[in-house]
Image (cartoon, rainbow, N blue to C red):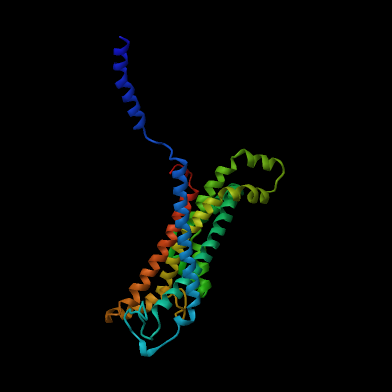
Amino acid sequence: MAEGWTMRRAPAAGHEAASVQEAPVLHASRVARRGNRRRMLVGLVGCMAFLVLVLVVGHAVASVAVTCDFSAKNLAPCAAHPFGTDWMGRDMLARTLAGLSTSVFVGLLAASCSSAIALALACVAALGGRVADAVVSWLIDLVMGIPHIVLLILVSYALGRGFWGVTIGVALTHWPSLARVLRAEIVQLREQPFLAASRAAGASRRSVVLGHVLPAVLPQLLVGATLTFPHAILHEASITFLGFGLSADEPAIGVILSESMQYLSAGYWWLAVLPGLALVVVVLAFSHVGSLVRRLFSARTVQE
């Protein structure tokens, strides 16, 4: 009987072991998590190195980008000129790199200023009382209610266009979404016991913001600033293409694309296609950086 009872229980034990083996794994192993984060860090460093290389090389070839050689005008892409030349004999690869360098610099400066504006207004809205919250919320709704490109053109034109007109215009039109996110985060932090204890201990509002609020919302701020870069670059190129941005004597991507439109019908496709593809690559690199930063700061990444 004992032997028969054991034989009847053996399949049940085997079935139970199989069910245990087939149970879903809720948490990845520590080795898998380390490998996943290592791959993300490698991708982040690679994208950042590529963007820095574009910025440095574009600045280095700025003088070559404006050099004219009418004996080599309208050349198709070749070994000597991988992106071809334009109607003035200027090397399109040098012009594209110089234009991308300008766009990246405008995007970095504008995104940084826009993030600072968003953080300041979010702190005012969340910690300044009902009146301040209502005013900031109304301002966010007002700016978000106007199309970005229209408001950007108005601000840039009012400031005289050019580099600073475009940069200030982009900075003043890209903060509302990030400000709304940061305000929600700070409102949640406002109810935490450590903030109440800090205020009860006599800490000033500035000390509370710098010592508690800013470190807590820093991940969201970095992610938001990184995701603002591609929008800033595209909008800078858009208004420059429309004639409301950088001046025509600067090797900007918007200027290159705008000038190439009148030569496309003549078959000079490389004047627009190759600089446009280069702009897409840079924008996708910035977007990938933003996605990787968001995943690195995400709580779910620990379980991936």
9 or 288: nearer the viewer: 9
Residue at horizontal 60%, vertical 48%?
213
The picture places residue 30, in percent across and down from the top left corner, at: 47, 41
Residue at horizontal 44%, vertical 54%?
291
Residue 272 placement, left or right of 250:
left
Residue at horizontal 59%, vertical 43%?
190
Residue 66 visible here? yes
Vertical placement of residue 239 versus 218, above or below: below
Residue 300 visible here? no
> Which quadrant: the N terminus?
top left
138 or 195: nearer the viewer: 195
The picture places residue 289, in percent across and down from the top left corner, at: 45, 58
Residue extending farthest front: 3
The picture places residue 4, in percent across and down from the top left corner, at: 29, 13
> Which quadrant: the C terminus?
top left
The picture places residue 177, in percent across and down from the top left corner, at: 48, 55
92 or 139: nearer the viewer: 92
